[in-house]
Amino acid sequence: MNESPFCIEMRKLSSDTRRLGRRVIPFDEIDSTNTYALAQGQIGDVIVADRQTLGRGRLGRSWFSEPGLGLWFTAVLDDPTEGLTFAAALAVREAVAARCALKIKWPNDLLCDGKKVCGILVESRGGTTALGVGLNVHHRREDFPEELQEKAGSLSSVAGGEWDRAALLRDVLNALDQKVILLTSGGFDTIRATWAEACDLIGRRIRNGSNEGVATEIDDHGAILLDTPAGTKRIISGEIEFLDGE
Amino acid sequence: MNIKELEELMRIFEASSLSEIEIEEDGRRMRLQKAQPIQPAFQPYPYAGPPLEQPGAVILAEAPEAAPVAEPEPEDVLPTIDSPMVGTFYSAPAPGEDLFIKVGDSVEEGQTVCIVEAMKLMNEVGAKLACKIVKVLVENGEPVEFGQPLFAVELA
């Protein structure tokens, strides 16, 4: 069977010069690149799909991943290094920085003009870690389901222009590879300051679950220290919402 | 040394006749010391101490300290499956979906029993040995500490 142009282009990105993406495994359609990665990925593989039928985010929320519109991929690593989820956000941000300035919303969502452009979901099972990235690339506003149109954006909708998904994947993988090398050689400290600054949190009023307060610090492990009426809370999970505007 | 190498080292150490081993690598020193009884996969239930700190390398080798409970009931000595990290405990893959496991279930080695999440890293916790779930010790969505018992079990 002939491979589609998408698969041919993506497969060409396999490279022995990186730890991640030595083998790029493309699919025209798959249930979820993370599911595949956890079930049968080998360390160093990158699974990329033109369409995910069951793409998902945190806690099983579905991730809209229709064909031709985005970059949906998963890198397969061994045990998760501390800071990996933040490194992934920095890598995507760096890869598009020349054309689009993305902000990081703690811990690792990427936004532009208040709209979510990229989501990252890292899942770990028995020594295999699936680092899944969903990057919206070509969506026009009307391509998103109605309930997402106010909240979601894509690189072309926020920054304009044409984007080549294969070139994007190459740039993200190159950046991610460098970050992973930094993490494994020097620990989370090597990226913490850059990531924490990109989160732009300090002094902001935020809500996390039932906790509301002012973020005073991002600690050594990436947790938010939140000054609340009930004392300082350490936030390590869940979503945050800005109470003082985006 | 990554976690996998550390686990491998611990296995070799356990099987050896050594009582103590000290290793220095890249400026980080680690000491493994045997104490009685050693139960690497399971800790005594219940967890009743103060919140446990994020581990240094040494903590993995510490003998399970006797929990400061005055008169332990017989079930208190059941082995437990413990949290591998600080995070939030989830008993199902997603809200509304079936629980990974429930009381009375027999669990195979490696089977996922829950997720502990920290900063969007969803860490599936697997049973290290085949066992039967006797009690679930934390609520869905509850914060958990490193080493905190999550399930009391009977070994199969």
Image (tube, rainbow, N blue to C red):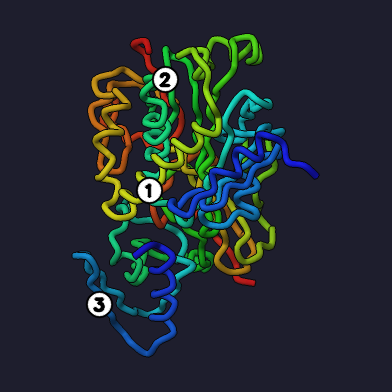
Query: Of helix, strand and loop, which one carries label 3?
Result: strand
Q: Is residue B139 left or right of residue A208?
A: right
For discs 1 and 2, the disc positioned in front in the rendered view: 1
Amino acid carrying label 1: it is: Val
Q: How far separated are the C-alphas under marks 1 and 2?
A: 28 Å
Which quarter of the image is occupied by the C terminus of chain B?
A: bottom right
In the image, farthest residue toward the left? B27
In the image, farthest residue toward the bottom? B17
Looking at the image, which residue is at 58% across and 69% down? B129
Q: Which residue is mark 3?
A: B22
| Disc 1 chain ID | A
On the image, the x and y values in percent for residue A179 come to 35, 44
Q: Do the residues indicated by labels 1 and 3 lie within the same chain of the protein?
A: no
Residue A123 position (above or below residue B21): above
Query: Of helix, strand and loop, which one carries label 1?
Result: helix
Residue A225 falls in image quadrant = top left
Q: How far separated are the C-alphas under marks 1 and 3?
A: 28 Å
Residue A240 falls in image quadrant = top left
Q: Is residue B38 left or right of residue B113?
A: left
Residue B84 position (above or below residue A142): below
| Residue toward you, A246 or B68 | A246
Q: Which residue is mark 2?
A: A241
Amino acid carrying label 3: it is: Glu
Which quarter of the image is occupied by the N terminus of chain B?
A: bottom left
Q: Which residue is mark 1?
A: A180
